[in-house]
Amino acid sequence: SGDLGRWLADGNIEFLGRNDFQVKIRGFRIELGEIESRLAQLPGIREAVLLAREDTPGDKRLVAYYTSSFEQPSPTAEQLRTQLAALLPDYMLPAAYVRLDSMPLTPNGKLDRRALPPPQDDAYATHSYEPPQGEIETRLAQVWAEVLGLDRIGRYDNFFDLGGHSLLAIQVVTRLRQALNVEVAIRDLFLYSQLNELALHVEQAAQS
């Protein structure tokens, strides 16, 4: 049935939840229902659904789907991520937030999770787009876009707000070494997670 339970000493069965709503991402076991509950309580949200997607083999990400309430303006991906960050640890934050007019349903009227669409660029917590400036920012943006699977990266975008994590950070560091012939530590990406900040650090590292 997909229900999780355990026998108790008195012969009763204790219900523990659903095994199809528990996922493991980068070593963390996550209960999707907990994130859905938090998301549904935020202002402007009418319905919320979480899905663990693996659109790129080996890169499983949490994606939030939501419909807006009729009484309040629809929140942006950046607003939702900021609000959830105050309620949940980093590893439980969805990488993308997809707004839908309505949730897809099966002929029986149940949620059709298979029909939920993959996230597009506007589903990520990006800032107002400003193109990269200079050669280093441009090369960095190309590397980030390739690793994150996005079409474009702005100079004020944050690597982790765009769905980046430690495993993808390793790929970024490796590609930067090949593209710019400069050594960048993984911790540098955590310290300078905004594109223009990392570009400045890379430039200084190259000069030294």
Image (cartoon, rainbow, N blue to C red):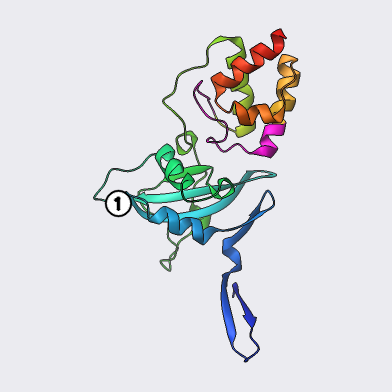
Q: Could you say where residue 205 lies in the image, as x and y percent from the top left?
A: 69, 14
Direction from residue 176 to residue 103 in the image, left or right: left
Q: Could you say where residue 110 lies in the image, as x and y percent from the top left?
A: 44, 65
Position above or below: 195 against 54: above
The residue under label 1 is 69
Q: What stretch is highlighted in magenta?
A: 151-170
Q: Is residue 166 magenta?
A: yes
Direction from residue 189 to residue 130 in the image, left or right: left
Instruction: Give the residue drawn at x 68%, y 30%.
Output: 187
Q: Could you say where residue 29 lies in the image, as x and y percent from the top left?
A: 64, 57
Q: Nearer the viewer, residue 190 or 64?
A: 190
Within 10 angstroms of label 1, few (less than 14), some, or many (20 or more) residues? Answer: some
Which quarter of the figure has residue 108?
A: bottom left
Q: Is residue 183 magenta?
A: no
Which part of the image, by quadrant, shows the C terminus?
top right
Which part of the image, by quadrant, shows the N terminus?
bottom right
Q: What element carries label 1?
A: loop
Q: Nearer the viewer, residue 177 or 2?
A: 177
Furthest-left residue in this view: 71
